[in-house]
Amino acid sequence: MTYLKHLECSECGHIFDAKQVHNLCPDCDAPLWARYDLDRAKAELDRDAFAMRPASLWRWRELLPIDDPARRVDLGEGGTPMLRIERIGRALGLNALWLKDEGRNPTGSFKARGMAAAVTHAKLLGVKEFVVPTAGNAGGAAAAYAARAGMPIHVYMPKDAPPVNVNECRSVGADVHLVDGLINDAGRLAATDAKRHGWFDLATLKEPYRVEGKKTMGYEIAQDLGWSLPDVIVYPTGGGTGLIGIWKACEEMAALGWIGSKRPRMVAVQAEGCQPIVKAFQQESLASELWPDAHTIAAGLRVPKALGDRMILRALRASHGTAIAVADDAIVRMTNDVLRLEGISMAYEGAATLVGARQLLERGWLRPDEQVVCLNTGAGWKNP
Ligand SMILES: *Cc1c(COP(=O)(O)O)cnc(C)c1O
Ligand SMILES: [Zn+2]
């Protein structure tokens, strides 16, 4: 049984019924938060009982938006390993470095977590057909979960998206539209067609449940570290769902009494060729501006303007974190170093976090003995 109570607008605080499908707040065009009855959950849930369940996203089912877990759309997502990476740590000058390896998820990226939650919830509420705009991996994951749910999906992606993403969508039967432009252009077309045909739009943060799936990374990190949080969590930021979700998980775990007062400093890593959040953070703005001519080899980071930019920036500031940009050639070198030194296959986006950690150490923002968790958000076989 879920403790989900209602949805709440992230800007105006208006409450919405979670038993109906929603996209953005109609007044503010802002994303909605899923809110749970955490007081009751605190009284009734035992954090240590979760460890007895199979390692899976659904281990956390009471804190996910799904009433009937038996009807979940499940491909075996979540429960990924936390790997200590000492050799890379030594090379970087970090003594307590961990990698949470999300590349093990179905479809080879952590997009699986979000789509498992969002597709399940929408299906249970009677949605019949999906649409999703994507830089690549979100499309692949959405297409696989739609296939698993036995539902049609339309995927809109940039025409220069990695071919592996186009193929994985087509191979599971998705209707793929290649768009002349970037993910935000794909998003506009997807939204128009969603309205015209009555499809449900799974775009990043346009529905409230992909964040819910991704927040389980935060629960797992805390559980793997013995119900404590690291000093720093480094996250490769495109649309920011994972960063927002992990920070939400920290707040929920505190309200549930699962963790003490320590919070991680959250770091958003972006690519030099597309760094709207880094710029907004440095300029102390509340929101970001569209990044012109966005380009990077890390397709998941090619998001010139994130719908959740305000939520990302709030989490960075509330956590005393920061944002930093890294160069593509350093990302590629790091990907190869991690393969040789640790045998771990990383997505370029994931390798970007290690480059970011090294730069923060050089700047003195990170100290060598701090406990650092980097997220490898995808598998190396998805790299172009
Ligand atoms: C989508 C994606 C990202 C960015 O994730 P957001 O939650 O949208 O910021 C990072 N890495 C990979 C591999 C991705 O597919
Ligand atoms: Zn609102």
Image (tube, grey):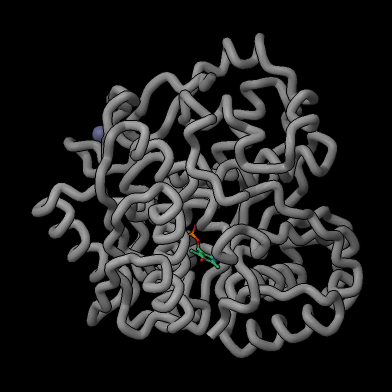
Foreground: 181 or 327?
181
Report the label total.
0
Ligand 2, seen in the image, is in the quarter at top left
Q: Is residue 92 above or below residue 370?
A: below
* Residue located at (48% from left, 43% from top): 73
Residue 370 in picture, x, y percent from top left = 83, 55
Q: Say whether residue 315 is visible.
A: no
Picture quadrant of residue 89: bottom right
Foreground: 233 or 119?
119
Residue 298 in picture, x, y percent from top left = 52, 78
* Residue located at (90% from left, 63% from top): 95
Picture quadrant of residue 118: top left
Foreground: 143 or 37?
143
Picture quadrant of residue 295: bottom left
* Residue located at (86% from left, 80% from top): 341
Q: Is residue 266 above or below residue 94?
A: above
* Residue located at (40% from left, 34% from top): 33
Residue 20 in picture, x, y percent from top left = 27, 28
- Outermost residue, left direction? 196
